[in-house]
Image: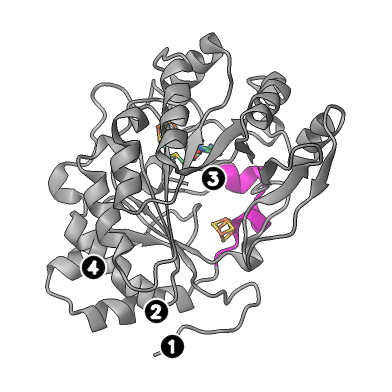
Amino acid sequence: MQIKKVTDTLNRPLRDLRISIIDRCNFRCQYCMPADLFGPDFAFLPKSELLSFEEIERIATIFVGLGVEKIRLTGGEPLLRNDVHILVKKIASIEGVKDIGLTTNGVYLPKYAKELKAAGLKRVNISLDTLNDALFGEINGRQVGTKPVLKGIMAAKKAGLEIKINMVVKKGLNDHEIIPMAQFCKDHGLHLRFIEFMDVGSTNGWKMDDVITKKEIYQILKSHFDMQPANPNYYGEVAKRYIYTDNGVEVGFITSVSEAFCSTCTRSRLSANGQIYTCLFNGNGYDIRDFMRNGASDEEIRARIIEIWNGRTDRYSEERTAETARQRKKIEMSYIGG
Ligand code: SAM
Ligand code: SF4
Ligand code: SF4
């Protein structure tokens, strides 16, 4: 059996894999894991339900055999899991892996950046939605100021990791921080990516009116900075990228709501408990963990992944309406990590 090569909307090549390695987090960002719903009694996954590093390595190796070149580790907060560098090393040694990234809130980077880099990690995406301490504390739901994240950014820089800063923009919450964040990142040579607020999961109270679109953010930026479009780096690149003309620093947009990119969506996701999702907005995943734990061979797992990928019809961002956002059951972001 082969992965189909056709690249119309419903038949896309499999190129990258995003792996959530833990569903827990030290933050409770209001657009992701609102504190009132993810309280002290929230039942996160017990360790036995999480994929072990060996299981992740095995599944990742099979995915790479099917065309995956880029792997990103995420969560929850991935650095809450012990010894992530060991997993990075395992993934880096899979033949065919060209790129390994990690998405993190940055708090534990001062502790781990150096060993992650030594293990083979190439890049980190660090989430920061404002430079204002009080607002940041309100957004992360834990009243943590920006300092730990800024220290994380510095540690990643010192370790030699490539860095992107992810800023989710929500109308009325942090849109006034667009220019200060852009200026800060530009001055420090950091690639900032503005992410449109999305209706992931069913707990973040998303409304279309809360979304500031790429077009709106771009207009705000244009009034302060000279920018020019950058050419896409590769097929299926998710970010629309620009360059500041005076210093060449990049700035990008993830336009998941206003300009859907489903027709070139080459990403599969593996949740912390070993379910495959072919779309960020799926309600249910396809089990691979129990299949594997019940003795499936590599060939059987491979055949199952091919069947799942070839049967893929998802294009949620092209179909989204206020109605689907409200009614459709969708996996929570903390399980599949964006
Ligand atoms: N904890 C890590 C972090 O925050 O970077 C990794 C997991 S987090 C779920 C991955 C990314 O998803 C972060 O950049 C976060 O800002 C983004 N995200 C979470 N909820 C979102 C939402 N409702 N809309 C858009 N992006 C969101
Ligand atoms: Fe945690 Fe990241 Fe979600 Fe914030 S966005 S609650 S840091 S997983
Ligand atoms: Fe891919 Fe689903 Fe996002 Fe479309 S909505 S780009 S299919 S993850």
Kindly tell me whether residue 108 is visible in this rendering.
yes
Residue where numbered disc 3 is placed? 327
* Mark 2 and mark 3: Cα distance apart in space: 29 Å
User: Hey, what amino acid is under mark 3?
Assistant: Gln
Residues shaded magenta: 314-325
Q: Is residue 314 left or right of residue 19?
A: right
Q: Which mark is residue 2?
A: 1
Badge 2 or badge 3: first in the primary sequence: 2
- Element at label 3: helix
Badge 4 or badge 3: first in the primary sequence: 4
Badge 1 or badge 2: first in the primary sequence: 1
User: Hey, what amino acid is under mark 4?
Assistant: Arg
For residue 218, what is the image quadrant? top right
Against 327, residue 264 (above or below) is below
Badge 1 or badge 4: first in the primary sequence: 1
Q: Is residue 22 left or right of residue 144?
A: left
Q: Is mark 2 within 8 Å of ligand 3?
A: no
Residue where numbered disc 2 is placed? 306
Against 218, residue 42 (above or below) is above
- Residue at image x 24%, y 81%? 300
Where the N terminus falls, by quadrant? Answer: bottom left
Q: How is the image coloured?
A: one colour
Q: Are marks 1 and 2 in contact (CB under 8 Å)?
A: yes
Residue where numbered disc 4 is placed? 58
User: Hey, what amino acid is under mark 1?
Assistant: Gln
42 or 239, which is in the foreground? Answer: 239
- Residue at image x 39%, y 16%? 142
